[in-house]
Amino acid sequence: MCGIAGRILNAPGKVGHDLVELMDAQEHRGADSTGFAVYGAPIETGYILRCMGFDKASMDADLSDFRDILMAHGSDFVGEPTIVTDAAKHYCVRMVVKDPGDIARWIGDADDMSHRFEVQSCGRSLEIIKDTGGSVEVADKHGVRDMIGTHGLGHARLATESSVLPNASHPFWARPFPDVAIVHNGQITDYYTWREKLQRQGYRFLTENDSELIAVWVSDQMKQGLTAEQALRKSITSIDGVFTYMLARPEGIGFAKDRFAMKPIVAIEENGELAAATEEQAVRRVFADECDVINYDGPSMMGIWGVGNRSLAA
């Protein structure tokens, strides 16, 4: 019952605003939590991190310990982190850090403190913002409407397989690969089988959300050398369940649907721009003029929409 969305602009613009519109139109599909993945202007060196701490009473200690881990891997803060907090117990952090020596080894060490401080995205341009509440509430708290970029994802969550926790919200980062994010609508029926198999290979799961499995599974496939397109195609026959998910990278957005075609996805493509969502009324929110809607209603479907003007996102 969740709602998902993707948006691609033909030049850098208010992609954050459009993602909020897409998710506001689908809030009836789930308002337990809302999340956004925004691809903004890429930085040449270093990484943009979005993190969440689970107890703001320990914020200073969390940031100090996290910085120690960064420095142990040859990295450090670039400037002061930006903190977002309100009456809730958790807090959110945006920071830019220097390139660590080895991203996979660094995030492995950083995840040792994920029970109190979690890295939720890492990229040259990707920023994942997620929190409990509806789209407008989350957008207002985190300034999503003002975020400039070329493309991104959105998700409205109705919790079915795990608790309503801010870090169990979508999107999920495909750790440790920078700038890769997923959103998912559906249910993974072989979740525990795949989770156990991937844990034996050394992967760590930070939530009980079955959607996180897709991010970890995609990471494993990419580690084995598959392209994003190959991973999308392989997931249709490898993962059991009813699902439609979107995978975003700096180059564009891809999607895959299960063999039963239970979870819808529609799209409008006009003048090098795209809006895709679970519901038609959502994509028409950002395309005001009358235009054709593509309904990807068949089984075992996948596709990739490219970002044609990525180099201008500076």
Image (cartoon, helix red, strand yellow):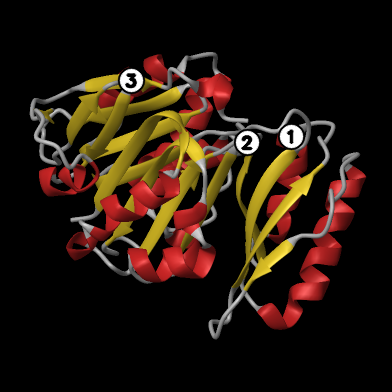
Amino acid type of the residue tagged 1 in the rendering: Ile
Give the residue number, with chain letter if any, for mark 3: 304
Estimate how packed mark 1 is, as few (under 14), some (14 to 19) or many (20 or more) residues with alpha carbons within 10 Å. some
* Residue 15 sits in quarter: top left
| The N terminus: image quadrant | bottom left
Query: Which mark is in front, 2 or 3?
Result: 3
- Residue type at the position of mark 3: Ile
Residue at point 75%, 74% (across, down)? 59
SS category of the residue bearing label 3: strand
Left or right placement of residue 222 versus residue 183 in this view: right
**Secondary element at image label 1:** helix
192 or 235, nearer to the observer: 235
**92, above or below 206, in the image:** below
Compute the Cα span from label 2 to label 3.
Answer: 22 Å
Relative image position of residue 136 (x, y in whole percent) = 36, 67
What is the crowding at mark 2: few (fewer than 14 residues within 10 Å), some, or many (at least 20)? many
User: In the drawing, what numbered circle is on residue 176?
Assistant: 2
- Residue designated by label 1: 103
